[in-house]
Amino acid sequence: MKNILKTYKIKLLQYTTIVTCCTLLSFKVASQTNENEVILGGYGGTYEQFTRNLIMPIFEKATGIKIKLVVGTALSNYSKVVSTKNNPEIDVYWSNELTHVSGKQLGLYEKLDPKIMTQLQNVYPIAKDPDGIGVLSHIQVTGFQYNSAKFKQAGIPVPSSWNDLFDPRLKGKVALYNFGVAFSQDLLVILTRLQGGTEKDVRPGLERLKALKSSGNLSFFATSPAEMDNMLIQGQAWIAVNSGPRSFMLKDRGAPIDFAIPKEGGGLFANYFDIVKNAPHPKAAQILTNFLISPEVQEIIAKDVIAAPVNSKVIVSEALKERIPFSEEKLRKLIKIDRVEMNRQLDSWADMWARELEGKN
């Protein structure tokens, strides 16, 4: 823990020397309002560490507005947004794609104000909500998490296609999450798309997964990221469908784990910053959201989450370029899922998956 805090202190010294147009505008706007607090519903773990140690001190120094952080999961914070919709307790909610879509349909979020949200002009088009409600916070890729040591020992090349899951040398070595984990939900759509289908009918993707199970390759269903990590690290399973950030974090800790994006395209898996409608601090919420998508903060998020930034002005290091889709061209190649249709169909998909793939009643 001491080493982690030391690292953050070094980073904080580096970032606090930067004065940007974004923070200057935030200070100017903040000085015109008596809103001296803003409440951010964010995540725990690594997210909480860099938010508290890097983002909050810079924002508070630049604007004079204090950030109150409410830590939870996307679902638990979404529940708070829903249950307090008549008297909101959160200003900015760090959502995921499904809770963003669901919240929009319920009218829970406010539109972004372009007069304050000046950084929107630098955000990649793919990261913008078409209705001007919310903006992507960063972009992860769904692809292959695999045991590189086992692949090397077996003489199997780095996986490069979604079809590689059917490689007979992987008999009994493919693991997937159960349907309760988002990466399997996305995989169902990705395989459907590759078969020429759409989110309106994911039967083609389900049949592909049933064929994978019938081949003997698909043998495990993990219920949590920790269980999946253990399967892969111990070599019980050799390959799974997971996120890039989690894979690289394990690799950097010395685990025999690596990540590969299939040539047909990895899945686009993203989070949003959503401003809650009738938020207690509406102007401060816009100021904070603008700050969170600024190049400086996006660089922090990209480095610490190992994810693609949404601001085109971020300078990505060569080392990070090897791990993330860092340009608009690369982002366009990712498979973007229709979350509106997914949200509509998810319960029926879950029933089909449980009954036909995992054999549950």
Image (cartoon, grey):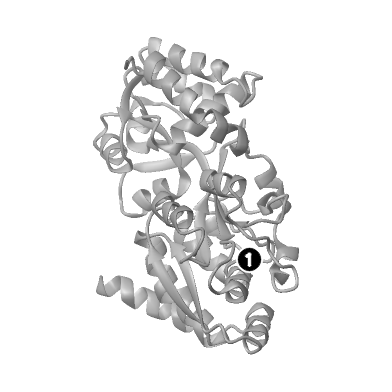
Note whether residue 262 is visible: no
Examine the rendered structure and indicate whether residue 342 appears above or below residue 203. below
Q: Position of residue 356 (x, y in %)?
A: 40, 14
- Residue 214 is left or right of residue 93, and the answer is left
Of the pair 345 and 250, the residue shown nearer to us: 345
Which residue lies under the disc numbered 1? 315
| 155 over 293 or under it: above or below | above
Residue 7 position in % (x across, y down):
37, 74
Q: Secondary structure at mark 1?
A: loop
Name the amino acid type tagged 1. Answer: Ile
Quadrant into which the N terminus falls? bottom left
Q: Residue furthest front?
A: 86
The count of marks equals: 1
Would residue 360 be found to the left or right of residue 101 on screen? left
Residue 167's quadrant in the figure? top left
Residue toward you, 33 or 256: 33
The quadrant of the picture occupied by the C terminus is: top left
Where is 115 relative to 255, above or below? below
Rendered image quadrant of residue 191: top right
Q: Position of residue 318 (x, y in %)?
A: 57, 59
Residue 37 coordinates in the image, percent (x, y)? 49, 80
